[in-house]
Amino acid sequence: MKTKTVIKALSVVCLAGNLLWFSAAANAMGDDSDAKKTPDCPKGQIYDSKTKSCMVDKGSMISDQDKTQYAYHLAKTGRYQEALTVLDTLKDQNTKEAWNYRGYATRKLGRTDEGIGYYQKSIAIDANYAKVREYLGEAYMIKGRPDLAKAQLSTIKGLCGTGCEEYRDLSAAIDGHPES
């Protein structure tokens, strides 16, 4: 009887450990799906997840999290300067996501060196943030530094493996097929 109890307890511990590992890996990978689900708002408005509507941000009623997510949505839809404007309104601009999305928008505006600086600030906050590693690698490809891009790819592989979106996207950029 004791053996069965020990085996059950070990099974539970292993299951819990696997769940924690997969959860950490998912967080490290990042996800563009939220940016794709976010609705477009008229210029000067931000999507607020509480009210499920586009709002003018009067008196900082919209959370930094919503502002950051909407800035990313703007950048992913090509509205780079608007994304930077929204990021400028954050109460706490020193987050891994805010620096990463600022880097993405500035890189897409052609200011690659400035973007690299922002990516490095994001990495200083969380070296295990795979999305910033992908974007930094893409910036290095723009700068003609595939060696540095491959180093980022190697780091991403260690964070989330070869099957995660960040690895696939950077690998494609290194192979000459960057994101559209």
Image (cartoon, rainbow, N blue to C red):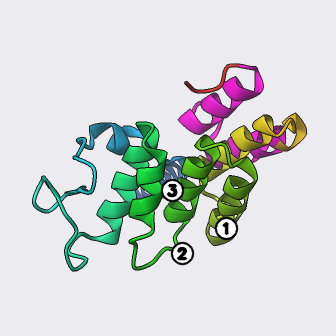
Q: Is mark 2 on a helix, strand or loop?
A: loop
Residue type at tag 2: Asn
The 10 Å Cα crowd at callout 1, few under 14, some 14 to 19, many 20 or more, is many
Which amino acid, by three-letter code, is at mark 1? Lys
Residue at numbered disc 3: 24
Provide the secondary structure element on which disc 1 rests.
helix
Disc nearest the viewer among 2 and 3: 2
Res 94 label: 2
Q: What stretch is highlighted in magenta?
A: 149-176
Q: Quadrant of residue 164?
A: top right
Q: Which numbered disc covers residue 121?
A: 1
The crowd level at tag 3 (other Cα within 10 Å; few <14, some 14-19, many 20+) is some
Q: Is residue 96 left or right of residue 68?
A: right
Instruction: Say if 129 sits above or below 155 in the image.
Output: below
> In the rendered image of this protein, does residue 144 appear above or below residue 112?
above
Q: Earlier in the sequence, mark 3 or mark 1?
A: 3
The 10 Å Cα crowd at callout 2, few under 14, some 14 to 19, many 20 or more, is: few
